[in-house]
Amino acid sequence: MNKIKKLPDAEFDIMKVVWENEPPITTNVIMQQLGSKKEWKAQTVISLMLRLVERGFIRTEKIGKERTYFPLISKEEYLKFETGDFMARFHENSFASLVATLYDGKKIKDSDLDQLTKWLEERKD
């Protein structure tokens, strides 16, 4: 498998639709669920899908006149990659730094910290 690379926002939006649907997925499904919100033309979606094929995120098969797409990288794999990259780049892999930033920025509540403490205690045993 290729090394996972960060996706541009438009391609990530496509992948979210791919992950939310049972494979195989078609361009029409992408257009129905995303194209109108983004005001994308079919050719834009096709171009983005081809980029995702080139990057190794999806594979494509032609069935009759229609192309179908299958995910090669799961949502969990990608989120694990993105989270790891974020932690390394912005917090030097320090969980304490991440929590402190969220807490100081009022993005995390005391109740969230209580939940986190409980979660950590469960993992110790």
Image (spheres, grey):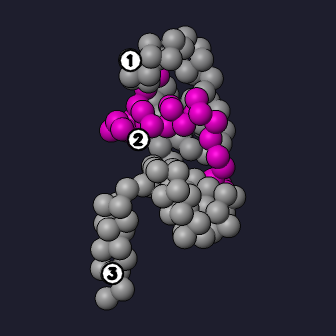
Residue to which mark 1 is pinned: 32
State which tag comes first along the sequence, 3 or 2: 2
Q: CA distance from mark 1 to mark 2?
A: 15 Å
Q: Residues within 10 Å of mark 1 (few under 14, many from 20)?
A: few
Is 11 located above or below residue 90 in the figure?
above
Q: Which mark is residue 19?
A: 2
Is 121 located above or below residue 74 in the figure?
below
State which tag comes first along the sequence, 1 or 3: 1
Residue to which mark 3 is pinned: 121
Amino acid tagged 3: Glu
Mark 1: which secondary structure?
helix
Q: CA distance from mark 1 to mark 3?
A: 45 Å
State which tag comes first along the sequence, 1 or 2: 2
Q: Which residue corresponds to the image point at 47% horizontal and 43% vertical from the top-left?
A: 71
- What segment carries the magenta color? 1-28
Percent coordinates x, y for residue 22 in the rendering: 33, 38
